[in-house]
Amino acid sequence: MLEELADGETSAERIVRAAIERAQDLGGDLHAFVSVIVEPAIAAARGFDARRRNGERLPVLAGVPWAVKDVVDVAGCVTRAGSRTTEARAPAAADAAVVAEIADLGAVLVGKTSTNELAYGGPSRDVDFPMALNPAGRDRFTGGSSSGSAAAVAAGIVPFAIGTDTGGSVRGPAAWTGCIGVKPTIGALPSSGVMALAGSLDHVGFLTRTVDDADVVWSALCGEPPQRPLGPTLAGFRIGFLSGDWVGADADQAVRGAVDHAAHVVDALDAELVDVEMPDFAEFAAVGRVLIMAEAWETHAATMRHHPERFGEATRGRLLLGATITAADKALASRSRRHLATATCAAFEHVDVIVTPTAVAEPPLLADVVTPRPRSEPPCEPFSLIGSTSPMRTIPFNLTGHPAVSVPAGRTESNLPVGLQVVGRPWGERDALRVARAIEYHGGEVLDV
Amino acid sequence: MTDDDTLIAALRRVGLVADPAMTASLEASYRDLRSQIDLIAATEVRVDDRRPAT
């Protein structure tokens, strides 16, 4: 797209108009967007076209359409975060810092994408915003909470979208819809103007359709030239593949196959495979769940105490559980978090990147996990992406802050996407992207939506 | 499990009352959460055991 724009083969206006049409038609069908920005986007695109015709030097992403999750402020828009609790909010007075940064790079915002309630609940039928559907299988859960951003990117509506990731909310939906999810090093992308869920774990991240696109976006955000083409060799890379409960005995066969295949691929590209020891995934999962639930409760306690009815059932339930976490519990989890981060840093003394599944199971049927449950069913434990039985393997790197990229790595027997997670050292996003590029699965990635 | 170990009791301790159907549906999640907190505590003991004496 960038080359076509630079060569004059197309115009920013044409590209942006096409993205807007897709957002309105297909995006509406998938419930991927809560709002589509039309006139300001077309005006911005025309402005870039005029400047290009005048021979002006343009910012690196000039004319590229993008979307942002509706927990991020956009000046003049009400940030609804998929919740009735935000009904009375005023429009944002200013863009969130990350929106302003991307605007400075020339990308053209075409809409705000749907989210599970407050980046925490769902999938829910009892909130005012419909759930984003999974382009890879509309009867399947998209994952959460950046579900609209994932659906918009996976369906080819926009080439990239911003999401947020507190326990895996960028990487999980990326894996289950078949696109790339990048959770950078903690704090790398600014969170000012982004609605908090659990402040010490919240990350701003983004989704793209290919690793090459992710490299372009990341490089632009860093003010560096892209690595393209991402190298054909991985000589000099030391790569560790985690096993044990990081994969788990119950993992989908296709996930196991993807891990084995990825190891074979990087070995063939001259990377060194290194045995690496990490604490059990279960320890990370426990600490992550306690801290997210405790912090989410702190974030929303005032509204919960006065207006619990404004939350959807799933969010209300999770917040109630968080309310029971004591200060002593949280202190215990915080101490453990420090031990786990130290152990992770120690592991990275021996490797450059670590590879794990993003999720060890395929996306569940939406009917099996949506809340509220039908009245005919007995009360049951609500589905949770951060519970002890969650298939996600993402939360450890929210605790430690390491950058992690989810990359499509195959398909299950039901032809649903499988994602692997490539984790780098702090500020090692480029290494993670290089390895992700090597194991990126290309077969069947053009989704029939 | 005693009455003190239930979700309803834990919520009452922080001044919250939830409807019985909801607390019933969350009871298993609450027990799971408490078991994860127990796991963290047990792990911390193991980590402390591994740390050299000073």
Image (spheres, coloured by chain):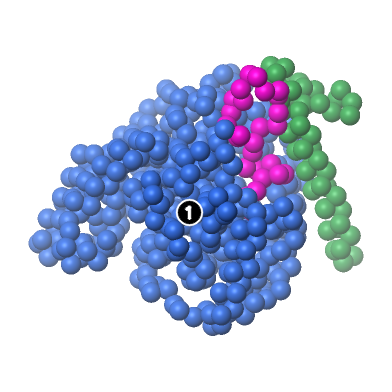
Q: Quadrant of the N terminus of chain A?
A: bottom left
The tint chain A carries is blue
Residue A320 location (% of width, % of height): 67, 28
Q: Is residue A116 left or right of residue A247?
A: left
Q: Residue furthest left?
A: A54
Q: Residue at x 79, y 48 (%)?
A: B40
The amino acid sitting under disc 1 is Gly
Q: Residue at x 45, y 37 (%)?
A: A132
Q: Residue furthest front?
A: A413
Total label count?
Answer: 1
In the rendered image, residue A13 lying in the magenta stretch gets the answer no
Q: Secondary structure at mark 1?
A: loop
In the rendered image, the vertical position of residue A403 relative to residue A309, given as above or below: below
Residue B28 location (% of width, % of height): 76, 32
| Chain identifier, colour green | B
Residue A54 location (% of width, % of height): 9, 62
Q: Which residue is mark 1?
A: A178
